Amino acid sequence: MNAASPATHPEKEVQFNLQDINVHFGLQQALHNINLQIAKGDRLALIGANGSGKSTLLRVLHGLITSTRVKATGRLTGTIKTMPGTRQAMLFQRPHMLRMSVLNNVTLAAWLNGQSWQAGKKQAMNELKRVGLQIYRSDQRTPCRKGSSNVLHLHAPV
């Protein structure tokens, strides 16, 4: 993704300010001098060919790319703000589950977030029921319909 003219929002509260963002994966440069401001209430569409850097930019915004994993330069100011009681999630293009039941995958997400396995399992069952996916709880793979799979992955970090 190449640099674009920086948008400025003098009258709006800026949520994100990216200045000269560059990301390299080895010798491959994924982002080239990105300058972007995103103000409160803005809607942004990232459109581009495969491999153009859309997902890399989203990873930068979510704080998933740091200079310890890849060579990243520039400045990002701002954070993703969520409503009280909500959590942030990013659904990747090809989410994968471990080779265990859907219920255990969702329980694992809760356990990794600090819950006991039993409490996580109870919460995972409730969450699967809430989103209408309880019938998949013993399946070893994600539901075959892509929409159901995406719902499951969004709700896995209960």
Image: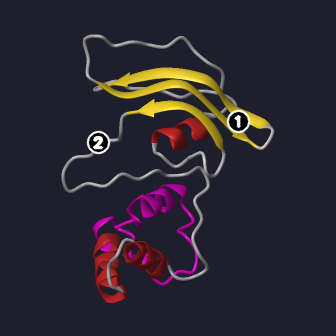
Please, what is the three-letter code of the amino acid marked with disc 1?
A: Asn
Q: How is the image coloured?
A: secondary structure
- The question of residue 142 being in magenta is answered with yes
Mark 1 burial class by Cα count in 10 Å: few <14, some 14-19, many 20+: few
Badge 1 is on which residue?
Answer: 50
Q: Is residue 142 above or below residue 140?
A: above
| Residue 136 or residue 32, whichever sits in front | 32
Determine whether, in the image, residue 3 is placed left or right of residue 90: right
Q: What residue is shown at x 47% (from left), y 38% (from top)?
A: 61
Q: Is residue 37 above or below residue 80?
A: above
Residues in magenta, as a range? 129-158
- The question of residue 17 being in magenta is answered with no
Mark 2 burial class by Cα count in 10 Å: few <14, some 14-19, many 20+: few
Q: What residue is shown at x 21% (from left), y 47% (from top)?
A: 83
Q: What residue is shown at x 64% (from left), y 27% (from top)?
A: 48
As helix, strand or loop, the secondary structure at mark 2 comes to loop
Seen from this angle, which residue lies furthest left?
Answer: 84
**Of the image marks 2 and 1, the number of the one nearer the N terminus:** 1
Badge 2 is on which residue?
Answer: 81
As helix, strand or loop, the secondary structure at mark 1 comes to loop
Q: The N terminus is located in which quarter?
A: top right
| Residue 22 or residue 40, whichever sits in front | 22
Please, what is the three-letter code of the amino acid marked with disc 2?
A: Lys
Contact flag, marks 2 and 1 (Cβ < 8 Å): no
x, y percent for residue 32: 66, 25
Quarter of the rendering containing residue 4 = top right
